Image (cartoon, rainbow, N blue to C red):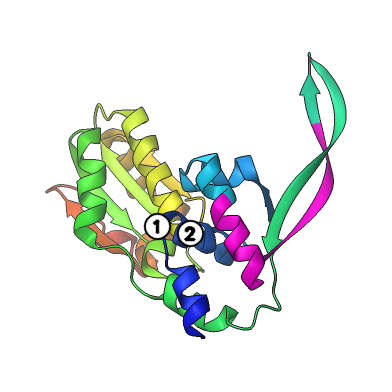
């Protein structure tokens, strides 16, 4: 990469998150509002970063017809969206740098979810460990957990990783029932690549492996 392009690409944290969003969703297009929401960034910041990405050829704009509700009536409206330009010359090295490189530490995940309450089992898979074949990215087991705090932590990691997370939350009783019934989702998670970040006694998952 040239020095000018590198300087533009790594000029801010929102810019990196926007690039991850496009790299993780290469066949999708996003409006300004979509990008702001998915990256937890302000509109004005997103506009500025998109100008940079357009200038270097990483993204391209187009207008699409979108159905919107105005005063409870469906109407067609032209909306400007952005999509990844797959002909961008440095796409492959950027993917290796921003997606394949480990960007999150285990402690970061535990710290973010800890305010949700007493978590008895916390397992990461899928996008957290760069396994695109996994059915789920995250499993949380606990009792009296704060749903909104879990959702807030999930949204944070989605903004960092550029991908909507597939996750499951169970209370202890339901988890134990599903475990003893060899629930398909649980078997797929524990028989595949995964990392256990929090584990309490009595929640052994050994029986779910190699089913």
Residue at x-position 32% and y-position 41%: 175
**Which span of residues is magenta-colored?**
48-67
**Residue under numbered circle 1:** 13
| Extreme residue toward the top, this view | 71
Q: Quadrant of residue 204?
A: bottom left
**Residue under numbered circle 2:** 15
Q: Quadrant of residue 22?
A: bottom right
Residue 99 horizontal/vertical position (percent): 45, 71
Q: CA distance from mark 1 to mark 2?
A: 5 Å
Q: Is residue 110 above or below residue 16?
A: above
Residue at x-position 39% and y-position 50%: 157
Looking at the rendered image, the quarter that the C terminus falls into is bottom left
Residue 30 horizontal/vertical position (percent): 67, 50
**Mark 1–mark 2 CB contact (< 8 Å):** yes
Residue at x-position 52% and y-position 57%: 18
Residue 89 horizontal/vertical position (percent): 63, 83
Residue at x-position 50% and y-position 63%: 20
Q: How many marks?
A: 2
> For residue 164: magenta?
no
């Amino acid at each position: 990469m040239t020095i000018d392009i590198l300087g533009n690409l790594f000029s801010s944290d929102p810019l990196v998150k926007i690039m991850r969003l496009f790299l993780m969703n290469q066949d999708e297009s996003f409006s300004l509002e979509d990008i702001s929401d998915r990256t937890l960034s302000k509109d004005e910041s997103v506009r500025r970063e998109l100008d940079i990405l357009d200038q270097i050829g990483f993204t391209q704009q187009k207008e699409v017809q979108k159905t919107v509700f105005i005063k409870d009536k469906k109407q067609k409206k032209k909306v400007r969206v952005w999509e990844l330009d797959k002909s961008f010359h440095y796409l492959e090295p950027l993917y290796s740098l921003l997606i394949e490189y480990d960007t999150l530490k285990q402690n970061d995940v535990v710290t973010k979810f800890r305010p949700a309450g007493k978590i008895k089992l916390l397992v990461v898979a899928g996008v957290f460990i760069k396994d695109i074949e996994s059915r789920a990215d995250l499993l949380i087991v606990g009792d009296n957990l704060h749903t909104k705090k879990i959702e807030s932590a999930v949204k944070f990691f989605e903004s960092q990783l550029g991908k909507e997370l597939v996750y499951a939350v169970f209370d202890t009783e339901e988890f134990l029932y599903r475990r003893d019934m060899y629930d398909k989702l649980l078997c797929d998670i524990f028989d595949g690549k995964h990392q256990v970040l929090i584990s309490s006694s009595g929640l052994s998952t050994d029986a779910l492996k190699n089913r």
